Amino acid sequence: MNINNNMNNQKKRTFIEAARQAQIVECAIETIASLGFAQASLAQIAKRAGISTGVISYHFKNKETLIRHVIEKVYTSGDSYMRPLIQSATSAREMLSVYIESNIAFMSAHKTYMLALLEIWSGIRPEEGKESFVFNLQEGAIYDLVQILQFGQKSGEFRTFSPRVMAITIRQAIDGLPPQIMTNPELDLDAYAQELITLFKLATDKNVTLSV
């Protein structure tokens, strides 16, 4: 038995399977975005991918499993785009600005991803385990923001406030953008990003006096 050949064949199969899975996920995103969540059946996804539904079933247990991979793909793609840019910033203020700006830039460049995600959120039914899966992804985004905000407070750049409340508020402001992108193609996203940057600069700046 040639162990090296067997290992090489196994690696080749693994690579091919990973590539096929990625193709199916991308086709699922495109199908959901174009047809809507309810109409994006496995048959429609297979048709777009140029494969049989059996191939999809081989890689994904069911549509629910595939949808989880779609959601994860959108989140991880955004993270991969944003994280290096944020980590290159030299201050908490810059990190927060880059966080907002890069997040909106990703949304602008991946409108199909955003539309697919909107369709999923509007069409998916809550089931056992699904809430924790989505919750963990959303919590990861909030956690990253909390770290930036806490860093800014420790460095003296930001005023005293609840980092979690502020992080949730920032995320809500950003997450409210995709529906606007879909309904208003002429929306100036650069201006939108700069307005949010200014808004949360005022909200976090230690030199801004707040009166009740």
Image (cartoon, rainbow, N blue to C red):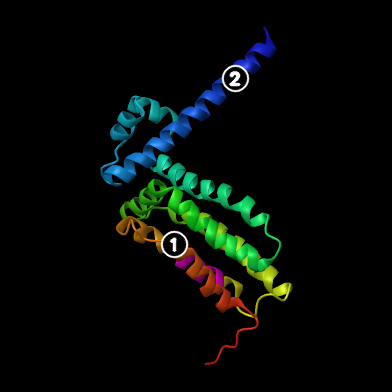
Q: Front-most of 105 and 176? A: 105
Give the residue at mark 2: 10
Compared with residue 178, is residue 116 higher up or lower down, i.e. above or below?
above
Circle 1 Cα neighbour tier, 10 Å, few/some/many (<14 / 14–19 / ≥20): some
Compared with residue 141, is residue 205 higher up or lower down, i.e. above or below?
below
Residue type at tag 1: Asp
The answer to if 170 sits in the magenta stretch is: yes
At mark 2, the secondary structure is helix
Which quadrant of the structure image shows residue 163? bottom right
Residue type at tag 2: Gln
Give the residue at mark 1: 175
Q: Residue at x 43, y 37 (%)?
A: 25
The magenta-colored residue range is 166-175
Compared with residue 117, is residue 25 higher up or lower down, i.e. above or below?
above
In screen coordinates, is 170 left or right of 111? Answer: right
First in residue order: circle 2 vs circle 1? 2
